[in-house]
Amino acid sequence: MTTEKSVLEFACSQIRTITRHLEEGEPESQTQIKSHYLFIPLKSLPLTIPTTPNPRQPNLLAKPCKQMMKTLEEEPERFTDYNRGLLLIADKVHFVHENGDAKKIIVDFGVDEEGIPKGGLVDGGHTYAVLKEKIGDESLAELPIFVTIIEGVTDFASPLARARNTSVQVKENSMANLEEQFEPIKQALGDYNNKVIYYENENLANDGAAFPIEELVGLMTALNTDIYGKDSQPTIVYTGVSTCLNKWMNKKNRSSYEKLYPLLPSIVELYEYLYTRFEDYAKEAGMSHVGKINGVEKTRGRGSKRKAVQITLPFTGEVVGYRLSKGFSMPVFAALRFLLIEKEGKMEWATEPKKFLDDHAGKLFQKIFEAHQKEYGSNPNKTGKSTVLWQNIANAVIISSLEERLLINR
């Protein structure tokens, strides 16, 4: 059992400090608040940060914790991007410099008359609980955790904590207001509806939801031929999937997405089909050892901590033994939009997409792997961002689909 401490020292990096003087126009005033922004490697995260100011006790069974655990297990490199990190308040902060650079930080949370820390964790209680569970995982030892420390505000710890936690709820409520707009999507998804996370709310009864609405809209964006024709590519679904939701929310674009709603069950099944068949397609492309491809992860950790990757896909429940970079899957998936035709204001598959993948995906992935290795230095991020590569894959699908239709119509 750990005991909360009023003074802590730990390693840190990439420190930025902003000072705000409370007395405007008096830059020399001693009445000031400092906000320190920094990263802490998970292995150095203290287990004894006071949680006195935090109004809620974390629940590891709550949906946010489950989602964070999933991210840490399946794509830990994205945790820092997805997570707001920890917000601490302190009485005093001091940095320990080595060779001119600050390498450690000493945080004094202060104590009240009863010896209880006045400062501590204000926001991020669920994040802290999850990270403490994972702190012994050697594969995550260097994972950077974003931490904000506000120095000089312990005297109004309670109102600050209340304000910060209320601000999170406002965000949740604003997302909840979109629920009526999501209703057509929910109806179109049918039984798959319960697999989608529409907004952050830890009290949702449906613990099976695992696929963010942003990702779902991203799949529709990839197949949206009104926005992305043969000469423009939806690389946005790789570089910034959250922006896809902004496109969907733009009323000018909404009708183009609505055409795809009837196909939503087949869309999510198709993406997961592509994902589960990837290893077979890669072997057809001449890659006999997919685990050696930079961008395909089959194991995680080192030494005795090394373990096989196992991912359960959210909609079909299929289990795969690898995690695949979207830089490989999305160019192929997006190119399948050219198998769609519009009839009476709705999109339909002109060609059975799963069969098309089985017939052609090997050649498509061969193009991707060749470019990945020869042109992009085996860097999956550069591969995923390449508009030229996406265009080449799209052209290949257009040509192959036209050839198939010509054969059928002979």
Image (cartoon, grey):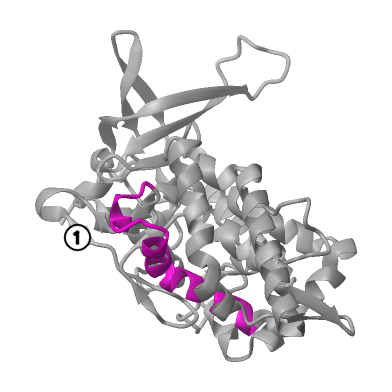
Please report the residue visible at 62 percent of the width from the left and 72 percent of the height from the top.
198
List the single residue furthest toward the bottom: 191
Q: For residue 279: magenta? A: yes
Q: Nearer the viewer, residue 353 or 87?
A: 353
Could you tell me which quadrant the C terminus lies in?
A: bottom right
Q: Which residues are magenta?
A: 265-294
Residue 15: which quarter of the image?
top left
Type of amino acid under label 1: Lys
Q: Is residue 268 above or below residue 308?
A: below
Q: Nearer the viewer, residue 219 or 51?
A: 219
Q: Which residue is mark 1?
A: 307
Element type where label 1 sits in the image? strand
Residue 188 in view in this figure: yes
Q: Is residue 357 above or below residue 332?
A: below
Residue 201 in view in this figure: no
Q: For residue 297: magenta? A: no
Q: Position of residue 326 (x, y in %)?
A: 51, 56
Please report the residue visible at 79 percent of the width from the left and 63 percent of the height from the top.
249
Q: Is residue 122 above or below residue 343?
A: above
Q: Position of residue 188 (x, y in %)?
A: 70, 86
Main SS, magenta residues:
helix
Q: Nearer the viewer, residue 288 or 9?
A: 288
List the single residue furthest toward the front: 410
Q: Is residue 351 left or right of residue 45?
A: right
